[in-house]
Amino acid sequence: MNTNPSKSHIEKMLQHAQHVLGVQVLFAPASAAWAWDNIPMLPMTTKGLQRSTTEHRNSPAMLLPRNSELFSIFTDERHGLFVQAQGCEDLFVLQARWAVLKLLLPANSSCLVVAYENKANVLMLGVFDVLRVEGVDRSAVSVFDRQAELFSLFQKAPKLQDIEQHWVGLEHALVSYMQIPEHVRSLPFEVDHMLRLLSGEQKQKQFHLLLRPIITNNLNWIGQK
């Protein structure tokens, strides 16, 4: 008996899944089986909110757009694009509207993306990590080394409609950035939280949802201790 959630169940849970997940892969031809073996499993996001701490000031983190959802994507040797939603083991073909990703990702590569609506109500994919490039597993190198590689891929690719690199930086730098009201207003999306990408040993990967700093009139802020 298959206890994994079906596509319809996922779409009920996730607002953007219906615009990201294409046909579900129910049988496993060689190409799909290979994708299943190589698509990265997204870490789960821990329940509850945490505050940014000095201990994690140098942890990689990113802004989390409001009502956003996380997906992992793999492109095979023929540039077939496959996708999984966070918390689901089922494999899907990526919807055709995102096929331009093949201009960014070389064959036999994988990445993590955040799907969100920007302030203009346009659905975007923000690529925030690359874990495999041309068959080479990059998961063992640092997040920031992978960010450099991702930046290089975007530099080489043409402008991709509705697909952007989603910036990952040091947690304390993000907190400082979000203290400035002009920065918050200039963001292309609404944001309530930050996401810490790693916590503790890398073998124990989990994402942590963080409170966004709250600006007060005297420019002191809440959200870090």
Image (tube, rainbow, N blue to C red):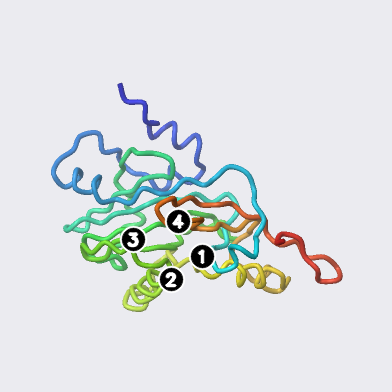
Image point (54%, 63%), residue name? 62
Q: Which residue is mark 3?
A: 139
Q: Earlier in the sequence, mark 3 or mark 2?
A: 3
Q: Are marks 1 and 2 in contact (CB under 8 Å)?
A: yes
Q: Which residue is mark 4?
A: 201
Q: CA distance from mark 2 to mark 4?
A: 16 Å
Q: Earlier in the sequence, mark 4 or mark 3?
A: 3
Q: Which residue is mark 2?
A: 144
The residue furthest left is 30
Pointer 3 local density, CA inside 10 Å: few below 14, some 14–19, many at least 20: some
Of 98 and 50, nearer the camera is 50
The amino acid on which the numbered mark 1 sits, given as a three-letter code, is Pro
Secondary element under disc 2, as helix, strand or loop, is helix
Q: CA distance from mark 3 to mark 1?
A: 14 Å
Q: Which mark is residue 117?
A: none
Q: Measured along the vertical axis of the image, is residue 195 above or below residue 23?
A: below
**Quarter-wise, where is residue 80 in the image?**
bottom left
Looking at the picture, how far across and down is residue 124, in whole percent? Answer: 48, 59
Q: CA distance from mark 4 to mark 3?
A: 13 Å
Q: Earlier in the sequence, mark 2 or mark 4?
A: 2
Q: Which mark is residue 60?
A: 1
Q: Measured along the vertical axis of the image, is residue 95 above or below residue 108?
A: above
Pointer 2 local density, CA inside 10 Å: few below 14, some 14–19, many at least 20: some
